[in-house]
Image (tube, helix red, strand yellow):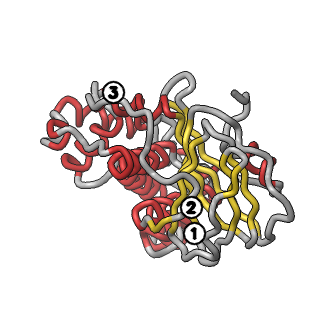
């Protein structure tokens, strides 16, 4: 097994592209899950080096039309598919030798899961472990759900420094649930579908999130404090609060920023820091999207 992992800089090196920005999460030792943005306007002149051989999978989603590539599995060329529409997904099992040559430019999101991470999620739900995902390796097929999840995560991949760990966890858990439901016939246990958070769980979760507006706590951290799995916690939170944890957190950041803008004269950069944003640019962008005006303009209106 390679010491490299099939996400981020390792993928950039293998595909001979300048960069492959990634967001990486971890459930425990050797239980990584990640997403990597893999793109280039230029076709490949030759076959890539192999992806690292490990007990993991990649679900690769094409964001643009016209993807045309050759894939070799254990040294055997797979049947060519020709240029493909956007939204197609390809499953790669990294226990095998996987190589690729892009005959076109490419714009992909690679969802990476160590098999131990997938099984860790299943154990928390009380479901059986899996060894295989039943999908034809290396064949691109339409998958609107994965395409939507990839699009939702794209801003976090373009600017990983602004990514909220709780939001990244939310999307990657949704991807894992989709893969296990579609390719392993693993559905959520009925008990996990009923009811929201107990009052003490709701109180503990909102306290933790409010105390960590920068989103440094992972979804798994908050869920553990509520004695739930991350996926069960996320569903129960939505039922109790009417929105996912990452959206509730963003709402609290904006409310904190509004309070500071209205009651103080401190700088926008300091307000961004105190409200849990990565920097002033990130703060201004999110505030403007939600409030319909910039923080500076909103402050001036309040002080008139």
Tag 3's secondary structure? helix
In the foreground, 298 or 64: 64
**Which residue is under mark 1?**
63
- Residue 42 position by quadrant: bottom right
Count up the numbered dots.
3
Q: Tell me which label, 2 or 3, sits earlier in the chain.
A: 3
Across and down, in percent, residue 183 comes to 38, 49
Residue lying at the far top in this picture: please name it: 29
Marks 2 & 1, CB-CB < 8 Å contact: yes
Residue 78 image position (x, y, % from top left) = 64, 58
Q: Which mark is residue 154?
A: 2
Q: Residue at 75% across / 44% down in the picture?
A: 50
Drawn side of residue 304 relative to residue 55, left or right = left
Q: Nearer the viewer, residue 276 or 205?
A: 205
Q: Residues within 10 Å of mark 1 (few under 14, many from 20)?
A: many
Gap in Å between the C-alphas at discs 3 and 1?
32 Å
Which of pointers 2 and 3 indicates the residue nearer the eye? 3
Which of the labelled discs sits on residue 123, or is there none?
Answer: 3
> Circle 2: is it few (<14), some (14-19), or many (20+) Cα within 10 Å?
some
Q: Is residue 211 left or right of residue 125?
A: right
Q: Earlier in the sequence, mark 3 or mark 1?
A: 1
Q: Is residue 256 visible from the viewing direction of this image?
A: no
Cα gap from disc 2 to disc 1, whole angstroms: 10 Å
Q: SS for tag 1?
A: loop
Residue at 25% across / 49% down in the picture?
A: 238
Q: Position of residue 8 (x, y in %)?
A: 69, 46
């Amino acid at each position: 097994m390679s010491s490299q992992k099939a996400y981020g800089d390792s993928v950039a090196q293998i595909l001979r592209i300048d960069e492959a920005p990634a967001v990486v999460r971890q459930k425990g030792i050797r239980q990584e899950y990640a997403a990597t943005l893999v793109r280039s306007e230029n076709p490949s002149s030759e076959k890539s080096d192999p992806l690292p051989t490990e007990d993991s999978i990649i679900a690769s989603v094409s964001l643009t039309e016209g993807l045309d590539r050759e894939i070799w599995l254990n040294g055997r060329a797979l049947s060519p598919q020709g240029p493909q529409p956007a939204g197609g997904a390809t499953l790669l099992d990294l226990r095998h030798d996987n190589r690729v040559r892009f005959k076109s430019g490419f714009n992909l999101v690679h969802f990476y899961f160590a098999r131990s991470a997938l099984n860790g999620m299943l154990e928390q739900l009380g479901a059986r472990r899996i060894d295989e995902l039943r999908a034809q390796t290396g064949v691109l097929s339409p998958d609107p759900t994965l395409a939507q999840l990839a699009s939702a995560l794209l801003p976090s991949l373009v600017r990983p420094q602004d990514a909220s760990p709780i939001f990244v966890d939310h999307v990657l858990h949704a991807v894992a649930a989709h893969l296990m439901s579609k390719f392993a016939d693993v559905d959520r246990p009925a008990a996990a579908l009923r009811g929201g958070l107990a009052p003490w769980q709701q109180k503990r979760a909102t306290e933790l999130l409010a105390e960590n507006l920068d989103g440094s706590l992972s979804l798994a951290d908050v869920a553990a404090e509520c004695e739930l799995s991350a996926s069960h916690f996320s569903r129960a939170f939505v039922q109790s609060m009417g929105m996912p944890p990452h959206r509730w957190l963003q709402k609290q950041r904006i409310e904190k920023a509004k309070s500071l803008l209205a009651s103080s004269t401190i700088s926008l950069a300091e307000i961004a820091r105190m409200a849990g944003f990565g920097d002033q640019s990130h703060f201004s962008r999110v505030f403007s999207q939600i409030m319909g005006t910039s923080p500076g303009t909103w402050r001036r209106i309040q002080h008139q």
